[in-house]
Image: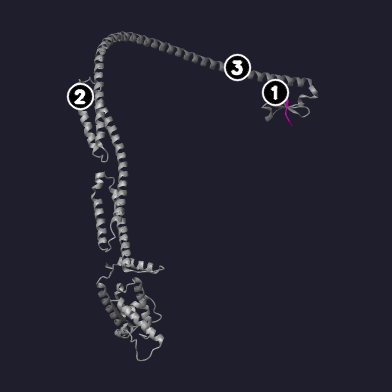
Amino acid sequence: MICGAGPTKTSILNTLKKFMVAAEFVSEDEDQYENLFGNLHVVLRDCSNDEDECSSIIFDLEDESPPQKLKKAERNALVERNDIRRSIASSFKTTKVWTLPKLDIKATEKGNERHREIAHQNNEYMSKIGQMRKVMIKNLAEPKYISGQKLTGPLLNGLLSHIKDSLNSDAPQLNPPSIMETVCKNQFKETEDKVINKIAEQLLECEKLLPLLEEEFEANEILSEIENESHREMEECLEQMQFGDIDLESFSLRYQDLKAKLEQRNQTMLSEKRKEETKQIQTVKEQLLKSFIEQISTVTPDGPPLEEKQLVDCLNQVEIIAYKDWDLSCDQWKYIDVIGVTKDFKEALQQFKAQRILSESERRRVYIEKVHLEEKNEKISEDLDKVKDDKALIEEKNRNLEKSNEQNKQEIEGQKKKHVEEMEKMKSSLEEQLKKQMDEQKVKQQQLQQQLQQDNMMNRNSMFMSNGVGGCSKQAFNCGSKSSGSNGREICTGPRGGQYYINGNGNKTYLKR
């Protein structure tokens, strides 16, 4: 036991034996793994023993011929421990044992934060940690090399990954040159992939500059800078590799493939842009030609035709303006052949110009014929004016006659209307007189009828009284009373008590009891 509660020297050596097994897997040649693992630091926690004493117990060779006789198993164990110590001395550049004092940590105080807090409060513990740090920093100041390659972080990561894969295989064989060659190639491949991905992103940003003309694409400074920077980065990575069979051929092919794709994209966009500009320039061409036609058609359109020289001068001025407008519009076309389209435009202008000269010549001929015809028409117009004047006089007389007839007609109509009104008044007066006479006659007739009824009544009464009709005397009739049902006539009572009155026809009308 090295410490009261620590591991034995045998268990520590058996743990370090694993490094020796790894060294044996690295190469069958023992000369190749001498000082293979650099500096060895063994840390013994919760140990208060002297570090030199612990180091002597672990790493110093034991006497294989002690005075007392050892058992065979003990002797074999002693020889095995010495073999491990010899392998450790051969595989490691230096060995160092560190002892850390025990911290006063209770069983209930768990957690790394609590342990760290207690450790910082122990001056002896922190002093020992400071010594370990200084020694390890000194050991790490000089870079480590494996098979001539500087051991860097990425290289170490690749190396450990390769060792892990090899140890997990059925027949592990770890040879530093072959391992480092594989790791370097892998690291170079990772660097290549990283640079290619970076180039792909940069070329993707370059798509914002597209489309470019073929000569602009080849001479583009940004693309040249990307290519130069990427090759410089790969060459720096290659300089760090000591193996001759690694080159930039694969990288160059991948870069050219990315550049070819960008160039293909540029050609596609360039073709689309040329189609678009061709369509646009055709539209501008049609608009300018239409404007030119409209302008040359306004050259003396209604006035007398010009002579051919005057007309050509006017058309030349319009043509110069059209050429200026065309030149201004051509500045925006970058991806198409403007020269050919300009030639077609000028030919079209000349064609329309020739047509305008021809049409003006024809207009001049028509104009002369028109002047002669207008002179004839003017004379005919004078004769027509004279006829129109005579016709106007006749029409004036006819209008006056019609006006006079209209006045006479209005007077007759007025008299007729007045006569009709007088007749209507006369008719109304006669109707009123006739109605009045008829009303008077009706009143007289009613009075006469009432008088007749009274006379009849008196005659009947006289006859009843004189003859005693029905065995009734005058006294048997009670006359003189009136009732609402008799319409205001005198009510009489018969010999049997019945009541009646004499109606308009002179007959009796009995009242209901």
For the N terminus, the image quarter is: bottom left
Is residue 297 or residue 386 the one in the foreground? 297
State the SS at label 1.
loop
Instruction: Please name which of the two marks, 2 or 1, marks the residue nearer to the observer.
Output: 2
Amino acid type, residue under disc 1 in the picture = Asn
The residue that label 3 is drawn on is 441
Left or right side of 80 for 386: left
The residue that label 2 is drawn on is 312
Q: Position of residue 3 (x, y in %)?
A: 36, 85
Instruction: Please name which of the two marks, 2 or 3, marks the residue nearer to the observer.
Output: 2
Residue displayed at 37% across by 78% down:
15
Name which of mark 2 and mark 1 comes first in the sequence: 2
Does the stretch in magenta take in 507? yes
Distance in Å between CA atoms under marks 2 and 1: 127 Å
Name which of mark 2 and mark 3 comes first in the sequence: 2
* Residue found at the far right of this picture: 471
Is residue 455 or residue 47 the one in the foreground? 47
Q: Is residue 401 above or below residue 268?
A: above
State the SS at label 3.
helix
Q: Is residue 114 above or below residue 263?
A: below
Does the stretch in magenta take in 195? no
The range drawn in magenta is 506-513
The residue that label 1 is drawn on is 503
Residue displayed at 25% across by 59% down:
235
Name which of mark 1 and mark 3 comes first in the sequence: 3
Q: Position of residue 138 (x, y in %)?
A: 25, 75
Amino acid type, residue under disc 3 in the picture = Gln
* Residue found at the far bottom of this picture: 68
Q: Quadrant of residue 133?
A: bottom left
Distance in Å between CA atoms under marks 2 and 3: 114 Å
